[in-house]
Image (spheres, rainbow, N blue to C red):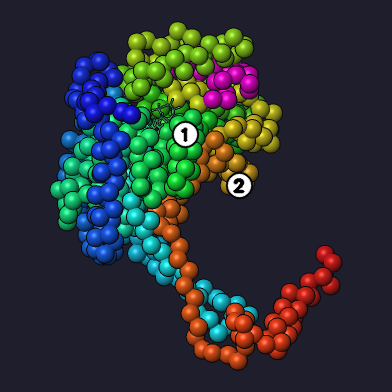
């Protein structure tokens, strides 16, 4: 049981206490969820047009106060203000997209009833699930949870949001800002706290949990939710590969791969962690990216590790790679300086080292040469993770992309699928399941209700004790006619 004390949030750059936040107890979380259930009924009745108006006003409110929220993100995460501003902009765009498309995505659909049931009308309706619990991470504290919050709200659900203990202020700001435009209370509530607060949410009466964070915690969340059959969306980490083909624009590939790996101090689930570069262009690629990495200014281009315990993970991956024979071209095992990590570029990194198998979540990049594209694809897919990937090739990008075992691929670019609201975001394997963003993401916060109706009566009854032999004969004859002829086709 968590205590009902407050907890303090520090600036990761200076260690200075920024503010103190309420640590919601289990009972308090349960109470908030009950209030959210009442709000959910009213919010659903509110209808698509009215909800759209509220959500678009929220998007405008955040836009108007973009500087304030960006500064808060900067101080809680330690990231540069420009990165925080970019994150807020993309989050705003997601709210707007979800608000504008919810009605169309959730429209009733007529479905063909088939020859056997030709007298029936068949329909699929969509309803919001009720109350969605969102458990968010600290690396993109507005962009990431917004992929669940905005879509769940647009679908007609109430949301209870548990932000990471490293970004409680951003979480609170989101609920406070929504309150400025909300027609009534408890549509979006934030419960700040530590891990036990998140756990309480998974044990509450929420109808769905949308989680972003580590695979380890995702498994705990899924296990807890299984107790009461609460469905979950799990957006976990990755070990994202970048494939550089021989016909790639090498400078562009180096520039984007470097940014993908190092921006936000490498704390991006969709950030590059491994590069597979085809031998014939490897030297040029490594030369360009190494020069670029040496020019990076730590503290200006990216900030410190937001979560201090991550530094041990980064250190252990660097040590493991070094002990297994990796060569360091930029930085090395001594690159961690206080809360900051200087850029690290390694080559010839053994595939069984933790720097290649586990999520590092730091500004490090492992580059391995491959003899051809097939090898690059095979090694990319050998990971236990399957979140995203990037491919650099002028001619073969789409062909390579189609063979990658992951949820998202960008060709000659990095990250940008996250900024396109219409496409789903999520992974496979240890990177999780379910999707946020796009129609698929919105539908996660709904359930399908099938409704079938008799359009006209026919003299045959199948679901009655008054069923006749004639009905059975008609049924078997029809089935034979429709499905019985395929055995004749041998090929
Ligand atoms: P966690 O997965 O532990 O935390 C993510 C969220 O889950 C936080 O809000 C956390 O709350 C909450 N939480 C923790 N324990 C529970 C629980 N038992 N039940 C319900 N909710 C819980 O990630 P960390 O912040 O500890 O980071 C660890 C690693 O996860 C990183 O090193 C990185 O590899 C990965 N990660 C991946 C992210 C991604 O975008 N996919 C984002 C963040 C981390 P609280 O913060 O209060 O503990």
Kindly indicate the quadrant of the structure image that contains residue 137.
Answer: top left
Q: Which residue is mark 1?
A: 220
Quarter of the image that includes the N terminus: top left
What residue is at 35 percent from the left and 22 percent from the top?
307
As drawn, 30 above or below 455? above
Which of 352/415 is in front?
Answer: 352
> Are discs 1 and 2 less than 8 Å apart at CB?
no
- Side (left or right) of 87 relative to 412: left
What residue is at 55 percent from the left and 20 percent from the top?
355
**Disc 2: CA contacts within 10 A as few (<14), some (14-19) or many (>=20):** few
Disc assigned to residue 402? 2
What residue is at 48 percent from the left and 79 percent from the top?
453
Furthest residue to the front?
465
Kindly indicate the quadrant of the structure image that contains residue 6.
Answer: top left
- Side (left or right) of 332 relative to 374: left
Look at the numbered disc 1 and give the secondary structure of its residue. helix
The residues tagged by marks 1 and 2 sit, at their Cα atoms, a distance apart of 32 Å
Furthest residue to the bottom?
459
Q: Is residue 421 visible to the viewer in this orientation of the structure?
A: no
Furthest residue to the left?
180
As drawn, 171 above or below 329? below
Residue 155's x, y, as percent? Answer: 34, 57
The answer as to whether callout 1 falls within 8 Å of ligand 1 is yes
As drawn, 84 above or below 102? above
Q: Which residues are magenta?
A: 342-358
The answer as to whether callout 2 falls within 8 Å of ligand 1 is no
Quarter of the image that includes the C terminus: bottom right
Q: Is residue 481 visible to the viewer in this orientation of the structure?
A: yes
Look at the numbered disc 2 and give the secondary structure of its residue. loop
Which of 215/421 is in front?
Answer: 215
């Amino acid at each position: 049981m968590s205590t009902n004390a407050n907890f303090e949030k520090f600036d990761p750059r200076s260690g200075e206490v920024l503010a103190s936040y309420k640590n919601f107890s289990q009972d308090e979380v349960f109470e908030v969820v009950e209030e959210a259930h009442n709000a959910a009924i009213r919010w659903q009745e509110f209808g698509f047009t009215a909800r759209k108006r509220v959500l678009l006003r929220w998007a405008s409110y955040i836009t108007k106060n973009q500087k304030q929220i960006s500064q808060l993100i900067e101080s809680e995460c330690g990231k540069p203000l420009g990165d925080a501003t970019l994150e807020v902009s993309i989050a705003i765009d997601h709210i707007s997209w979800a608000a504008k498309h919810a009605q169309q995505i959730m429209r009733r659909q007529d479905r063909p009833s088939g020859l056997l049931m030709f007298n029936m009308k068949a329909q699929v309706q969509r309803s919001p699930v009720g109350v969605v619990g969102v458990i968010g991470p600290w690396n993109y504290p507005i962009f990431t949870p917004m992929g669940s919050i905005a879509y769940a709200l647009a679908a007609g659900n109430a949301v209870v949001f548990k932000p990471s203990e490293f970004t409680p202020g951003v979480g609170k700001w989101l609920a406070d800002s929504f309150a400025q435009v909300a027609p009534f209370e408890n549509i979006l509530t934030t419960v700040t706290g530590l891990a036990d607060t998140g756990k309480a949410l998974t044990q509450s009466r929420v109808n769905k949990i949308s989680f972003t964070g580590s695979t380890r915690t995702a498994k705990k969340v899924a296990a807890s939710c299984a107790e009461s059959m609460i469905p979950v969306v799990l957006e976990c980490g990755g070990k994202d590969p970048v494939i550089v083909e021989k016909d790639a624009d090498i400078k562009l590939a180096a520039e984007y791969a470097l940014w993908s790996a190092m921006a936000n101090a490498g704390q991006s689930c969709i950030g590059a962690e491994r590069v597979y570069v085809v031998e014939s262009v490897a030297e040029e690629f490594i030369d360009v990216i190494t020069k670029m990495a040496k020019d990076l200014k730590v503290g200006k281009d990216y900030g410190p590790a937001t979560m201090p315990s991550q530094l041990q993970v980064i250190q252990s991956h660097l040590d493991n790679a070094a002990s297994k024979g990796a060569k360091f071209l930029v930085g090395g095992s001594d690159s961690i300086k206080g809360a900051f990590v200087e850029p690290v570029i390694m080559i010839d990194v053994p595939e069984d080292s933790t720097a290649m198998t586990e999520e590092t979540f730091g500004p490090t990049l492992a580059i391995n040469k491959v003899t051809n594209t097939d090898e690059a694809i095979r090694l990319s897919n050998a990971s236990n993770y399957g979140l995203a990937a990037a491919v650099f090739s002028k001619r073969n990008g789409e062909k390579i992309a189609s063979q990658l075992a992951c949820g998202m691929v960008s060709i000659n670019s990095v990250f940008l699928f996250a900024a396109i609201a219409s496409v789903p975001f999520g992974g496979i394997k240890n990177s999780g399941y379910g999707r946020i963003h796009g129609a698929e993401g919105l539908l996660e916060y709904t359930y399908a209700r099938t409704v079938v109706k008799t359009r006209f009566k026919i003299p045959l009854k199948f679901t009655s004790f008054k069923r006749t032999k004639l009905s059975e004969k008609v049924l078997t004859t029809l089935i034979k006619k429709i499905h019985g002829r395929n055995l004749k086709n041998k090929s």
